[in-house]
Amino acid sequence: MTGQGPTLLLQPCDAQGVALGPAQADAMPGAPHWGPYLAWWGPVGKPACQVGGGGFVQAPEHGQVEIGYFCLPACQRRGLGRLIAASLVQRAWLWDARLTIVAQTAEPDGPAMPSASARLLAGLGFMPQAPIKGLQWWHLPPATMQA
């Protein structure tokens, strides 16, 4: 289709960051793909550029799954990190709507100085948990992400 704006695509990859095709991702143990993804941004039907990545730390355990995400330095401060994190949450809930989504950030310097990741996670509806050894844990209960 022409005239559509840019879109985000998450493409499964292996642990070394090599992109996988759909058949390769489906053949991996633990399908659906509870692993890493490359994040691409561009117009529909046109070549896209890699803007970052993310994924699941491992397959769900005890009703929760941990996500991680990043933007390449040149792509930061454009809302792409939020899109990547939100896409991972939506993907997890598509596979199992009962999952609690978990993420972590470095412990903040205080409520007056939250990190960009802390603001991003809070904006999606994640709730901060007690910090553990310098890490701030965040939980998003099933099907509660804010738009």
Image (cartoon, rainbow, N blue to C red):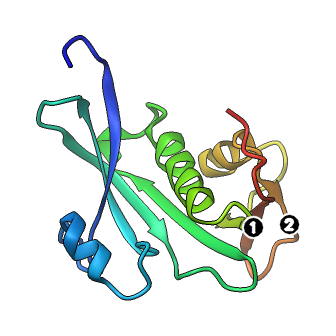
- Determine the residue located farthest toward the top in the rendered image: 3
Label 2: how many residues lie within 10 Å, few (<14), some (14-19) or many (20+)?
Answer: few
User: Relative to 123, does residue 44 appear above or below in the rendering?
Assistant: above
The residue positioned 71% from the left and 75% from the top of the image is: 64
Q: What's under tag 2, amino acid-wise?
A: Gln
Which numbered dot is residue 129?
2
- Which sits earlier in the primary sequence, circle 1 or circle 2? 2
- Identity of the amino acid at label 1? Gln
Choose mark 1 or mark 2, whichever is in front. Answer: 2
Height in image: 89 above or below 74?
Answer: below
**Residue at point 71% right, 39% down?**
123
The x and y percentages for residue 76 are: 41, 40
State yes or no: discs 1 and 2 in contact (Cβ < 8 Å).
Answer: yes
Label 1's element? strand
Question: Which label belongs to residue 54?
Answer: none
Q: Nearer the viewer, residue 137 or 33?
A: 33
- The quadrant of the picture occupied by the N terminus is top left
Which residue shows up at 72% across the image and 44% down it?
145
Left-right relation of 101 to 116: right
Q: Quadrant of the C terminus?
A: top right
Q: Residue at x 19, y 14 (%)?
A: 2
Residue 95 at x, y percent in the picture:
56, 64
Q: Quadrant of residue 11?
A: bottom left
Please name the residue that numbered disc 1 is placed on. Answer: 136
Mark 1 Cα shell of 10 Å, populated few (<14), some (14-19), many (≥20): some
Q: Provide the secondary structure element on which disc 2 rests.
A: loop
Give the answer, above or below, for where 80 lies relative to 5. Answer: below
Give the distance between the C-alpha atoms of the residues marked 1 and 2, in whole angstroms. 7 Å
